[in-house]
Every structure is written in C-alpha cells, then in structure tokens.
C-alpha cells in the first residue's frame, strides 16, 4: 500500500506547487501589460478602444498559461489517471 | 463534485449516453432559435419597433462593427460564423445563473468542437478569398523551413482556445461548488457575478481570437500584393 500513498502525496503536493509556481509568471505578465496599456491610454485617449481590445486579447493569451496550470492541478486532484490505476491494481 | 457535465448522464440507450452537455447544448440552441424567431417575426422599418428587434439590432450592429474594425474588411461574410460563435458562448455562459444548469462550455468536448470549427474556418475563408495555391503559399513564408512552425502554430492555438474557454468556465463553476460547501450564505453570489463577467469576457475573447485568425488568413496576401504594386 506504499505505492498508493506515494501517488496521493505526490498528486496533492504537485497540484499545489503547479498552481503556486505557475501563477507567478502570468501575474507578472498581466500586471506589466495592464500598466503599459494604462500608460498608452493616458497618452492617447482617442485610441482607447483599440488599446482596450488588444489588451483583452493579450490578457487572455497570458492568462491561458495560468489556466493550463489550473487544469493540470484539477486533473491531478479530481481525475488522476495514476490514482485510478493504483486503485484498480489494489483491487 | 463533477469535473465536467459530461459525467452527468440522464439517459442511456445502447452505447449512446445522453449526458448533461448534450441536453444543455440543445436547450441553449433552442433558446437562441426561439428568441430569434420570436424577435424577427414582425420586423418593421418604421419608428414603432419592438423591444426585441431593437435588442437584436444593437447586438448585430455591434458585432458587425467589431468585425469591421478587426479585419478591415466587409463584415458580411464573417458575420454568420463569428456571430453564432459569440452568441452561443455568451448564452451558454450567462445561463449559469439558472439553478440546476451547468454550462456546456464547461466541458472540454464542447470547447474542442468550437475550436475545431475555428480551425476549419480559417483555411475555408482563406481559400475562398485567395484560392488554394495562394493560401498554401503563405505556409512557406518567409522561408520554406517555416512550414512545420506554421502547422504547430495552427494546432497549438486551436488547443489553447479550447483549453482556455474550458478552464475559465469550469473553474468558475468549481469555485462556486467549493464555496457552497464552505460559506453557503453570501460569498457564492459574489463569485457567481464574477463568473458571469468572466463568461462574457471569455465569449468576447473567443470570438475576437477567431476573428483575428481568420483575418490573418484572409488579409496576408493583400498586404503583400499592395507592397508589390
């Protein structure tokens, strides 16, 4: 039964680490993008529509990195293929 | 707690199971069709127009303006596809406020199907605009060694569109489910409002990204032709 314990431990720890490490990059990237966009809007208020649309698309692109991490950690917790395999093997 | 509405099975006939994703997709489709049919039953160009016609005109005009600004082309060719994508995702996300409903966009099957539609629509519009040879030629721009990277780009952006929409909507419903078991009184309502905002923004982003991809396929050669002149 040591194997199944190890799988559970590794899954939960890695799910937390995936979210923790994986959200650092997108957070820095998004804050940078928003600050740049605010500066651009302050300089050229006429172009606010274009800048906002590009900002949203760019934010979605950046945010998808964090979403990938989230999906992986959710898979690790709720739909872990290794866990199912170990449960099946233990019978 | 279910990770996706695929796992909620209502009916099982033979090898075919009718899960919640299919049922709620049908409900969303029916809702859109019936609303559009009721609203366009008595159209009028005179000033006393109905509220529903006014609403639909605002939506259609706004989508047309957005497509025109992004693609810099006439929006009529792209309006049916992109407008349908946007409206379907918006309705299926915003209906999440109805109790007992789980958004079909919270299932990877639905979002993968939508992303594959975009994946197929990009070469369709590109070939319709430029012909097969001209469209295939842009894969070898700027050098012939870029062909694998163009193909990887198309595949990975399809995957990222599907996973982005799925992850956002699924995380919204999952956060609400978790909060309902921790603080069931007030906090889930706030998160539900946030989830509706995220649903709206994600529908907008999905439609804008599809527009950008289609525009890049249809506009690339025109710019090159203008440079050559």
Image: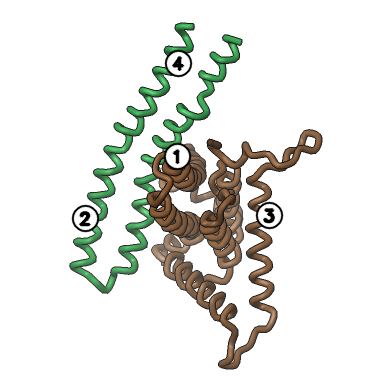
Chain colours: A green, B brown
Which comes sooner in the sequence, label 4 or label 2? 4
User: Which mark lies nearer to you, 3 or 1?
Assistant: 1
Q: Position of residue A91 (x, y in %)?
A: 61, 10
Element marked by disc 2? helix
* Residue count near mark 3 (Cα–Cα under 10 Å), binned few <14, some 14–19, many ≥20: few
Q: Is residue B221 visible?
A: no
User: Which mark lies nearer to you, 3 or 2?
Assistant: 3
In three-dimensional space, the C-alpha distance between marks 4 and 2, rounded to whole angstroms, equals: 42 Å
**Marks 4 & 1 on one chain:** no
In three-dimensional space, the C-alpha distance between marks 3 and 1, rounded to whole angstroms, equals: 30 Å
Query: Circle 1 marks a residue in which chain?
Result: B
User: Which mark lies nearer to you, 4 or 2?
Assistant: 4
Where B13 falls versus B210 (above or below)? above
**Marks 3 & 2 on one chain:** no
Query: Circle 2 marks a residue in which chain?
Result: A
- Which residue bears the numbered disc 3? B26
**Marks 3 & 1 on one chain:** yes
Q: Position of residue B102 (x, y in %)?
A: 57, 48
- The residue lying toward the viewer, choosing from A11 and A67, is A11
* Residue count near mark 4 (Cα–Cα under 10 Å), binned few <14, some 14–19, many ≥20: some
- Which residue bears the numbered disc 4? A7
Q: Position of residue B196 (x, y in %)?
A: 45, 57
**Marks 2 & 1 on one chain:** no
* Mark carried by residue A35: 2
């Amino acid at each position: 039964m040591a194997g199944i314990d190890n799988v559970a431990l590794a899954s939960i720890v890695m799910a937390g680490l995936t979210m923790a490490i994986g959200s650092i990059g997108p957070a820095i990237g998004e804050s940078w993008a928003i600050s740049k966009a605010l500066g651009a809007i302050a300089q050229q208020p006429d172009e606010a529509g274009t800048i906002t649309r590009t900002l949203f698309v760019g934010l979605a692109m950046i945010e998808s990195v964090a979403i990938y991490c989230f999906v992986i950690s959710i898979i690790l917790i709720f739909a872990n293929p290794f866990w199912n395999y170990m449960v099946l093997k233990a019978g | 707690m279910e990770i996706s509405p695929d796992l909620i099975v209502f009916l099982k006939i033979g090898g075919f199971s009718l899960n919640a994703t299919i049922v709620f997709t049908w409900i969303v489709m029916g809702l859109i069709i019936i609303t559009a049919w009721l609203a366009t039953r008595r159209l009028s160009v005179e000033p006393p127009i109905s509220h529903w016609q006014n609403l639909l005109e605002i939506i259609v005009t706004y989508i047309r303006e957005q497509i025109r600004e992004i693609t810099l082309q006439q929006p009529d060719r792209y309006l049916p596809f992109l407008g349908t994508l946007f409206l379907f995702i918006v309705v299926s996300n915003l209906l999440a406020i109805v109790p007992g409903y789980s958004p079909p966009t919270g299932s990877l099957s639905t979002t993968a199907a939508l992303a594959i539609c975009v994946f197929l629509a990009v070469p369709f519009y590109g070939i319709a605009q430029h012909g097969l040879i001209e469209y295939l030629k842009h894969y070898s721009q700027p050098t012939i060694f870029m062909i694998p990277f163009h193909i990887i780009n198309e595949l990975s952006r399809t995957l990222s569109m599907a996973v982005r929409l799925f992850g956002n909507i699924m995380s919204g419903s999952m956060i609400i489910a978790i909060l309902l078991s921790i603080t069931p009184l007030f906090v889930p309502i706030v998160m539900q409002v946030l989830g509706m905002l995220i649903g709206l923004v994600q529908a907008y982003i999905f439609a804008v990204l599809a527009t950008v991809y289609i525009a890049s396929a249809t506009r690339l050669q025109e710019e090159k032709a203008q440079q050559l002149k």
